[in-house]
Amino acid sequence: MSSALTDLFPLPIVQAPMAGGVSVPQLAAAVCEAGGLGFLAAGYKTADGMYQEIKRLRGLTSRPFGVNVFLPQPELAESGAVEVYAHQLAGEAAWYETELGDPHSGRDDGYDAKLAVLLDDPVPVVSFHFGVPDREVIARLRRAGTLTLVTATTAEEARAVEAAGADAVIAQGAEAGGHLGTHRDSPEDDGAGIGLLSLLAQVREAVDIPVVAAGGIIRGGQIAAVLAAGADAAQLGTAFLATEESGAPDPHKRALTDPLFTRTRLTRAFSGRPARSLVNRFLREHGPYAPAAYPDVHHLTSPLRKAAAKAGDAQGMALWAGQGHRMARELPAGRLVEVLAAELAEARTALSDASCTDESRKGGEGA
């Protein structure tokens, strides 16, 4: 399906915006230059920090790119659980010789200020995570010439995205690394995420706008599969996390294929919201007790995670990773896009040949 979105980039490959310093301008530029859609992640940055990265990216590429923004989070009804969790993490703070962060550092992630920048100096694409922006926000971005995408993890959420007027929906399966972009954080739904292919089928039937498939995609053959299932493009995160241009700490990159880390799990241990990480010591010890309190827990654990990264200790870091992490390849990002495109073409040729063979066989049977 041709659309204003997919007309922006020749290959159906979107580099997922990964907050926390991973999606740096060099990574996004390399993806854009290779024919995909590169993204910056504005999450956890100030509005000025986001603007400076946009300026750097524009200096590296003239191709269209995107910026991802987090939606403000509602106030917590009960904050006592965060205090209890802080007490439990006291030993971690002593071990890493740092202080715990202030859990009251803010809930809106500078949302209004970032929107003001993006409206004053528009970018080609803006995507949203953790909810649906107001219709007026989407309308204002459209008038500024910006296309909008919003993450959905259910068909119901996808319908809300379409109703708000977004140009496309990102259907995020439970296989995805990092935070699930659920519109409402409900602890009773923990572990009830929908796998990408099932979700994609449901979303495709629920909405008429273009769909970008995300979650566990790491090979070109998988891109071919989601395109055949109705997606207009595929979004890959973990695949790009391992690239040379990625801003991820080296211990995080190495952990993706380290035999020591054999599986992933959705956890609230690091941020207070469900996010898929490689299973390490911190996750095992604290995951069962982490409260549903985002972004309070994120702010609380931020100094611990930074100290662990500085010490090169992968056992104390948030090792965000999708379920396909063992297949990650340490390549330059542009080269990875080329490899993915070649794998996609090969898979499409195989599907076409198989279809032709099947049709020929049927014709012979009917002769």
Image (cartoon, rainbow, N blue to C red):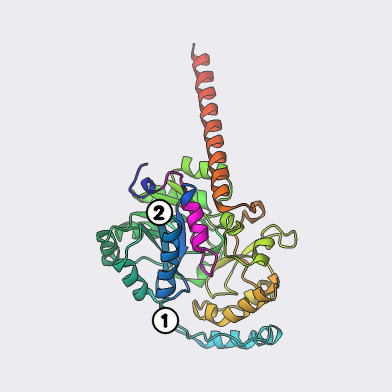
Q: The disc labelled 2 sits on which kind of residue? A: Ser
Please report the residue visible at 50 percent of the width from the left and 52 percent of the height from the top.
31
- The magenta region covers 9-32
Residue 32: x and y in percent read 46, 52
Residue 267: x and y in percent read 59, 69
Q: The disc labelled 1 sits on which kind of residue? A: Glu
Q: Nearer the viewer, residue 134 or 143?
A: 143
* 10 Å crowding of disc 1: few (<14), some (14-19), many (20+): few
For this orientation, the residue located farthest to the top is: 367
Q: Is residue 173 magenta?
A: no
Pair 1/2: label in front: 2
Residue that mark 2 sits on: 62
Please report the residue visible at 37 percent of the width from the left and 72 percent of the height from the top.
114
Q: Is residue 29 magenta?
A: yes
Please report the residue visible at 57 percent of the width from the left and 40 percent of the height from the top.
343
Residue that mark 1 sits on: 75
Q: Nearer the viewer, residue 343 or 273?
A: 343
Above or below for 73 versus 359: below
Residue 208: x and y in percent read 33, 48
User: Between disc 1 and disc 2, whose residue precedes?
Assistant: 2
Disc 2 secondary structure class: loop
